[in-house]
């Protein structure tokens, strides 16, 4: 069972993080608690495995990155962790993960690379290829951004009594 305060926290974290050096302070204030209590309860939700994943979405267009490519790499399975660390070490990489290859699609390591131009993106990927020692890859450039939303578990009305906070 979740307490009312835990429901408030879940409701607060399912939206965008405030663009502030202390976003959790702002979220805590939005649900009527101090930042320390908010963070303690949030950590407790994580430790109890009630929050399995907490991620951020990069709105790359708003950040000035107009060239974005998902790069699918064919990495030797016995080196995938090592290569993944190399790839994730590039500042331009926002995502790096392993997936099982499929028939007709031999790639098992994926990176999302962000750059200002297509040419600079290609140059970055060539450098990544060289550093990791991988020659087989496929670049898939973003054409347009589609829907980016997160799951919503508790809306503010779910924890407010009589419609008041």
Image: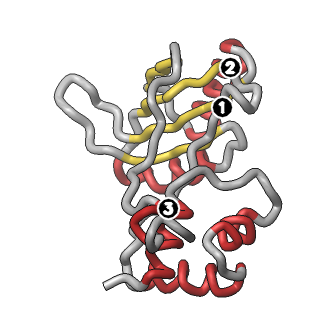
User: In which image quadrant can residue 155 be found?
Assistant: bottom left
Write the residue at 48% across / 62% down.
156
Secondary structure found at label 3: loop
Q: CA distance from mark 2 to mark 3?
A: 26 Å
Label ID, residue 54: 3
| Residue 18: % across, % down | 71, 54
Query: Could you say which is closer to the camera, residue 137 or residue 120?
Result: 120
User: In which image quadrant can residue 27 be found?
Assistant: bottom right
Write the residue at 66% across / 80% down.
33
Residue lying furthest front? 162
| Residue 151: % across, % down | 39, 51
Secondary structure found at label 1: loop
Label ID, residue 60: 1
Residue 46 visible in the snapshot: no
Q: How many residues crowd around disc 3 within 10 Å: few (fewer than 14), some, or many (20 or more)?
A: few
Q: Is residue 143 above or below residue 4?
A: above
């Amino acid at each position: 069972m979740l307490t009312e305060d835990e429901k408030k926290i879940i409701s607060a974290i399912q939206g965008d993080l405030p663009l502030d050096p202390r976003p959790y302070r702002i979220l805590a204030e939005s649900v009527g608690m101090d930042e320390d209590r908010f963070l303690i309860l949030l950590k407790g939700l994580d430790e109890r495995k009630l929050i399995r994943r907490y991620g951020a979405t990069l709105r790359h267009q708003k950040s000035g990155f107009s060239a974005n490519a998902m790069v699918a790499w064919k990495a030797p399975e016995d080196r995938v962790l090592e290569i993944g660390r190399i790839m994730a070490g590039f500042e331009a990489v926002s995502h790096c993960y392993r997936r099982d290859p499929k028939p007709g699609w031999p790639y098992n390591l994926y990176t999302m690379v962000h750059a200002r131009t297509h040419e600079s993106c290609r140059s970055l990927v060539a450098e990544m290829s060289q550093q990791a020692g991988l020659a087989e890859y496929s670049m898939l450039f973003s054409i347009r951004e589609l829907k980016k939303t997160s799951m919503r578990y508790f809306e503010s009305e779910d924890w407010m009594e009589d419609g008041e906070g």
